[in-house]
Amino acid sequence: MSPAIAAHEYSPWDFWREASVEERDAQLAVQHALIDGRPSHQLGEQCFISELASIDNDSLRLGDRTYVAAGAYLTGDLRAGADCSINPYTVIRGRVAMGDGVRIGAHTSILGFNHSMESGTPVFRQPLTSKGIEIGDDVWIGSHVVILDGVRVGSHAVLAASAVVTKDVPAGAVVGGNPARFIRWRVEPDDTGIAPDAAVEAAARATSESSAAASPEAPGAAEAPGTATGTTATGTTATHEAELPLMRATSAAQPSGSASAVFVAPTDAADAARPDAAGSVRADAADAARPDAAGSVRADASGEQGEPVASERAPLPRPEAHAAPAADDTADLAERVAELATRARAEASALLQRAWNDDLGLFADRPGATPTARAQGDAVEIADLLRGAAPSQASAEAQIARLQGWQDASTGAVAPLDADGRQQAGLGFSHDDVAYHVLSTGYALDLLGSAFPAPLTWVTAATPERVVAFCESLPWGSDAWGAGHHIDGFGTALLWTRRAGHPIPAGVEEALFGWLLVNADPHTGMWGSATPDRGLLPVVNGFYRASRGTFAQFGMPLPYAERVIDTVLRHARDPRWFAPGARNACNVLDVAHPLWLARETGYRGDEVRDLAARLLSDAVSTWAPGAGFSFREPSPATRGLAETEPGLQGTEMWLAILWYLADLAGVSDALGYRPRGVHRPEPAATLR
């Protein structure tokens, strides 16, 4: 008979309190065998590693009192904080980082890598990819959960048993199901149930937003009438939003044409509680006594055996109530801005060369990345902004020929590239990447002194009826950003069609602007609805995209400019997106541009200037020498993520953001440049 297996191999949480001296010595020997001679392996105090676990990591760092139970299988690069539990038969592979107090139930799989699956090659011969998985502090992961590569789980979240998590989980959310969907808040966004400073820090370690959205049929697109492809963004070339997908809300989309929102414009009373200069939320007296936010999710006495149970009752998040700290001294800020601009101009050639792929004769976002159509546009915009010329890696004529050659002569669409730099076939304007290439490729050609050679059938084949149907089919209620993305593309297709002198069917422009005017929400000044998991983020980001391609691009006044300012200022106080370390280029641009667009009202001008100055002050310090800006603001908690690596996309966007913030703060002259491409402040045409 084989000897009995010690209970602590499977239930190790009481090991250091109950184990004998011999058992403790044996455990320390197991740990020394794991780390000796391996500088990439580090274990904190009172960790436990079961002899029955399979640990084959390239690097392993476990914080104090973190344990690995029997049957666990660990590979790749794992970094776990203190007081984490990796229970029996858990699988953690690839690149995974988790904070303190992460409790993982048995038989869970956390897979920070993936196979490619292009046709023509067996899966086992395909290269592996890894975006990595990031899990915040105080996260409870139930048994039999699966977390897929690229997911970010915010602090204080709960993943119910058997959840299949394919998209990011906001801080404090309870999710469950296959695929996992938002159920309710364990911790509401403006109340982590922990000290205010810790709340902001935890929010900064939570996930960035992105936006994979089903794409409706575009008016005038090449697809047959009545078809909708439902294509989702790949995250590689489509848009300036983050590469990592974000968990969608489970609430149904609003009915066609509806633009009602959960949000109500803030009042002075609603703004009574505001953060201090460090971004810490200070609650007013009314918020002093609150119930335990986590009280409805219970484990049994051991703290390990219970599973999070998904409740279907989901209270709406309460309105946030924070404001911006004061701005730096204007003269000091102007000096810092000028120094950054000087450095950027001096290093422009180096950062462009860094992204150049000699083998394909194309730009990639950053070294090692696959070249994309978007990257060519970003390179042209950066070179124009900082050097006043085309990128030196190829002649302007060669770059024009390349960009024009990508346009489909029959539809006018520019399809995304594959890994070999060849265009993908069969994609129309309903594809997210194709819609964005109307902007990125079109403006790159414009900056090079050229234009699309073929008409854009998205516009030339449209009718007023199809435009209205297109607008009403967009997912305003569930994904306002995705809706705004396609409005932006169609509005920019109108620009190039008008510029080229191609006929625009009668009533098409009037149908687009008329629909937007009629359906703007008078409470927010925007289109679409807030969502339970992301709050105002999709509404504000979607407003930027939709208004950029229409009202801003054609010099038209906004329908509710003051309400836009109210909504943006309220949104900018949400620490999930604007705490230090949580900000990315998309979210900051989508705040800066609407505030700049509505600036002439003078409404809440001091608050706008203070916010702009604070964001600008933080942004100028994130330039990486010789490499530019990363898409997401770098921080210790986000180190190693692809979106914190400097690249063309982050550099192009942040250079434009700096101009808008600097202009709002009154120091834009110090930059010595003004965007002329996708993010140009002046109208590109008029409808009159």
Image (tube, rainbow, N blue to C red):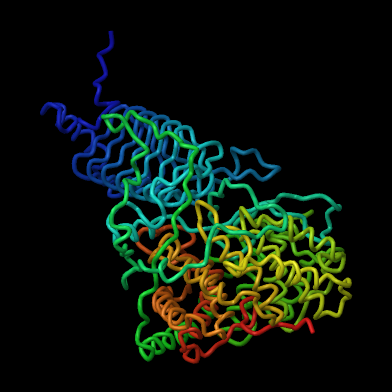
On the image, the x and y values in percent for residue 566 come to: 51, 72
For the C terminus, give its image quadrant.
bottom right
Front residue of this view, candidates 88 and 573: 573
At horizontal 53% and vertical 72% (from top left) the residue drawn is 589
Front residue of this view, candidates 660 and 444: 660
Question: Quick check: 209 left or right of 44?
Answer: right
At horizontal 39% and vertical 58% (from top left) the residue drawn is 190
**Residue 599, image quadrant:** bottom right
Question: Quick check: 52 left or right of 484?
Answer: left
Relative to 614, say whether 272 is above or below.
above
On the image, the x and y values in percent for residue 135 come to: 40, 48
**Residue 200, image quadrant:** bottom left
At horizontal 57% and vertical 75% (from top left) the residue drawn is 594
Front residue of this view, candidates 499 and 543: 543
On the image, the x and y values in percent for residue 420 come to: 67, 57
On the image, the x and y values in percent for residue 359 come to: 63, 65
Relative to 167, say whether 559 is above or below.
below
Q: Is residue 353 visible?
A: no
Relative to 387, say whether 566 is above or below.
above
